[in-house]
Image (cartoon, coloured by chain):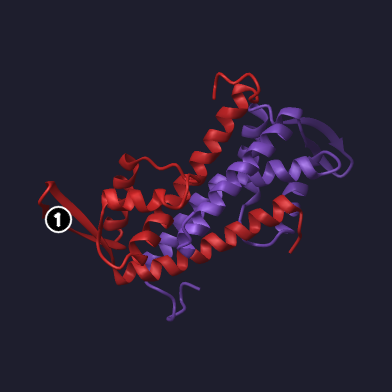
Chain colours: A red, B purple
Amino acid sequence: MLDDPDIAAPGLEAGVRKLQKELSSGVVSLALLALVARAGEPLYGYQIAKELDSFGEGLPVKQGTLYPVLRSLESAGLVSSLVEPSVSGPPRRYYSVTEEGRQALTLWQGAWVRTREFVDAVLEGHRG
Amino acid sequence: MLDDPDIAAPGLEAGVRKLQKELSSGVVSLALLALVARAGEPLYGYQIAKELDSFGEGLPVKQGTLYPVLRSLESAGLVSSLVEPSVSGPPRRYYSVTEEGRQALTLWQGAWVRTREFVDAVLEGHRG
């Protein structure tokens, strides 16, 4: 893509990557908490990564960046984890949502919707 | 609000504030660039702040936090500014979008829409 002569100036590409990264950092926690909360069973990292991928490529999150986010959700008490042996490899850490995590998800979704509606209003020029 | 006995636990409130802040930091540049680009004339800081406010309270941005973002847009070449004397007070710095800023806005809007659609899909459980 960087070799494509039709792309915009390199500075523009760098700027949009920076914006994409800033947007992602705010929403990865929200997306992971939602995935873990909606799963009917505890999920381990690779399953969570595959789930995320199944929603498209809008938020390119590498598997390695999931773990710090999951750990941070766990230290905030929003998910809990349990290590279980695996027949096919090393033990796996399974994540479940906590009751506090469910409450947080409701609040976070509200924050997301407010932000989304505000940004869309500005972009479309629709005053409230 | 913090005295309201019905609110969720303080940890939950802190978490949602942190998320709100992360979400905001990603979108303030986008919102300001869009405002300056759509204005029919150069705008100074107070006008930009008032414009932002006119779109609601979804993105609580203090006026003091606008200036670092405007400066950063200017050093990226996306807006330019000009200081003009004011009859009613100190000189004002007026901001206009540059041609590169218009191109960036198109790219940034695309990044925003992709992120928004992805997050909404995850929250609503709609696979792509």
Quadrant where the N terminus of chain A lies? top right
Can you identify the residue that label 1 sits on?
A83
Q: Which of A15 and B117 is in front in this view?
A: B117
Horizontal and vertical percent position of residue A117: 63, 60
Q: Is residue B38 above or below residue A38?
A: above
Q: Is residue B56 above or below residue A54?
A: below
**The residue positioned farthest toward the bottom in the image shown:** B6
User: Chain letter of disc 1?
Assistant: A
Residue at 68%, 30% in the rendered image? B74
Horizontal and vertical percent position of residue B24: 55, 51
Horizontal and vertical percent position of residue B14: 41, 61
Q: Is residue A73 left or right of residue B113?
A: left
Horizontal and vertical percent position of residue B80: 74, 30
Quadrant where the C terminus of chain A lies? bottom right
Q: How many marks?
A: 1
Residue at 32%, 56% in the rendered image? A73
Q: Is residue B12 above or below residue B43?
A: below
Task: Give the quarter of the image for residue A41.
Answer: bottom left
Kindly identify the amino acid type of the residue bearing the numbered disc 1: Val
Residue at 50%, 46% in the rendered image? A58
Q: In this view, does A66 lie to the left or right of A12?
A: left
Q: Is residue B73 above or below residue B65?
A: above
Q: In this view, does B54 lie to the left or right of A7?
A: right
Q: Nearer the viewer, residue A75 or A80?
A: A80
